[in-house]
Amino acid sequence: MASSLRNQARRIFQAAVRAAAPAEAVLRHVRLSRNTLIAGRKHYRLSAFRNIYVVGAGKASAKMAQAVERLLGKRISGGSINVKYGHTAKLARIRIDECGHPIPDSNGQAGAERIAEILRPAGSDDLVICLISGGASALLPLPAAPVTLGDKQETTRLLLESGANIHEMNCVRKHISEVKGGQLAKLAHPATVLTLILSDVVGDDLDVIGSGPTVPDRSTLADARNIIQKYRLENRIPRTVAERLGNDAAETPKPGDPIFAKVQNLIVGSNSLAVDAAARQARALGFHTLVLSTFVEGEARQIARVHAAIAKELRASGRPVKLPACVISGGETTVTIRGNGLGGRNQEFALAAAMDIAGLEDAVILSAGTDGIDGPTDAAGAIADGTTVARVEAFGHHPAEFLANNDSYHFFESLGDLIKTGPTETNVADIQIILAR
């Protein structure tokens, strides 16, 4: 029975990933009708534009660019996108630069500079199509003086290790960048800008996804300073970062700024759409299905305990949905690193859940990232059931020690319970699945 539930949980997760396929997401929302590009409810008469440039960044941006090339072909004058190492696709008219993630690197900076060079001379009769997907913040590093790439790398590392969430990370990133927080739109002004977005952010906040390079920035320098203080990093961040965050003249463009008059930001895929697809698959497999939330945030091990409690309630009483049951959630948790082990937020989630459902029959919990990559590992996440802890203890290991050392990868590797999909070339955050019979 547990094996059957495990296979079904994997099938439900795979349905979520398929629904987030980037090229298909673009083509669902953008189409060409004769000489008019239709994006959402807006129409762009292509004969009105002298040049069409394609730029962008993100783990899924290569596949998104393929879809744009399929639509526009030789109409594209040129372009450049930054992607994570290995997340490439065959393109004819758009350059690809492979870059570092989650810590930005020199390739990312060189690629960002190339994008800026394309946009600076853009005129009022040019169209810029910008492709943004998960990972764009790290993949599009163009530090604002006096901040250097090394300073930005160190700041990113400190925030990651402190457990800052994506909203907090991107608030700080925007205010030490020349392209984030609406500043890419500023570079492209007065061109027309169409940004297609595959969202990996809880709540799909436009100014947070990829740090909102073409979106008016609602966050402020004061917000960024407060985040640094919240995690007690005032004396740890590089001096240049503190200097930049203290310069109120370096504020990002805000709502109402005329540079956004000719900018459209269109979400073509999101965690919510992936969760809906997972729910359809679960129902097709015969489960009574409940979508718990697509706004899941917080410390991974704490959120996991809540999901474990739901699994126990399902088995005990058939609440909050009758058996056989599937409860699905989506979002992005964080991990405060205290050990020196290997893992990611989804693997840590599954480990903490495994400890709380030890001995529980006929229930499984899966947590995995839709991009196929969880932390600095080759796994998307992991799956656990009531036998997980006993199986590890039979090897003489202690689950609590793995959790304390943030070593969830080696915990699940020893059991063969890692979820390994390889890079999926999309990214709409994480999916958690509880199944119970």
Image: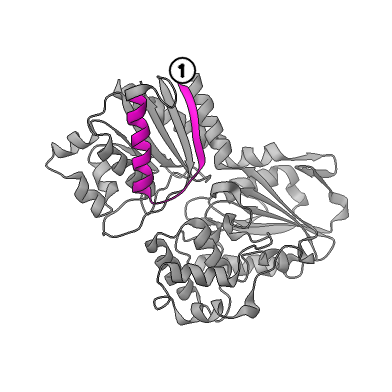
Residue 200 visible, this angle: no
Residue 321 visible, this angle: yes
Residue 397, picture quadrant: top left
Residue 83 lies, in percent from the top left, at: 54, 55
Task: From the image, tell me which residue sits under label 1.
Answer: 286
Give SS at disc 1. Answer: loop
- Residue toward you, 162 or 127: 162
From the image, which quarter does the N terminus lie in? top left
Is residue 297 rendered magenta in the image? yes
The stretch of residues the image draws in magenta is: 286-315
Q: Is residue 415 above or below residue 56?
A: above
Residue type at numbered disc 1: Gly
Residue 255 lies, in percent from the top left, at: 72, 62
Residue 58 lies, in percent from the top left, at: 56, 54
Judge left or right: residue 338 versus residue 262.
Answer: left
- Residue toward you, 266 or 360: 360
